[in-house]
Every structure is written in structure tokens, then in C-alpha cells.
Amino acid sequence: FAQKNVPLQAFKMIKGVDEVVVENGIYTFSSAPDSDIRKEIFETAVANSLTILEMHKDKASIEDIFRKLTKSVVDAKYF
């Protein structure tokens, strides 16, 4: 989003949103593979006077899922 002070709670309340992650100014929304939450994200952004500069839908590969799961185990092991 081009503006600051994005109301993350508004996005977390969207039906189908499992997770919202913000990293280096990039907002990543996770949902079930069979759901498309882009319309609801857009509508929530408009309702909060926010501008979306780019939006696209990605699918996680099995390798991505494995990496995410094993990273959690590795991180927990070293702390």
C-alpha cells in the first residue's frame, strides 16, 4: 500500500484470510488454495482510502510448503 498506518485488523477480518504478513513494506495475504480473496482485499483498501500499487495471486509449491514447515522446526531448534 502506498500509505502508512494500514489498518491490518481490517484485512485480518476478511473471510478467507488466514494470515497477513508485512515485510519491507510488502503485504502478503495467505488463504486456502481454493479461495480468491483479491476482491475483498481491494474493497477493504478502498473503504480505508488506501491505494494498491500491485496485486497478484501466487500458489505455493510443495517445495515452498516444505521449506516453510522445516524452517519453523529449525528456528525452534536453535532458540
Image (cartoon, rainbow, N blue to C red):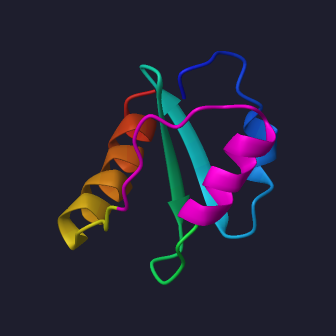
Residue at 54% over, 61% down: 38
Q: Position of residue 20 (x, y in %)?
A: 60, 45
Q: For residue 31, what is the image quadrant?
A: bottom right
Q: Position of residue 7 (x, y in %)?
A: 77, 31
Front residue of this view, candidates 62 and 51: 51
Residue at 52% over, 37% down: 52
Left or right? Give the position of 44 relative to 52.
right
Residue at 54% over, 78% down: 35
Magenta segment includes 44: yes
- Which quadrant is the N terminus positioned in? top right
Q: Which residues are magenta?
A: 38-57
Q: Is residue 2 above or below residue 39?
A: above
Front residue of this view, candidates 52 and 61: 52
Q: Position of residue 45 (x, y in %)?
A: 68, 42
Left or right? Give the position of 31 relative to 49.
left
Q: For residue 78, what is the image quadrant?
A: top left
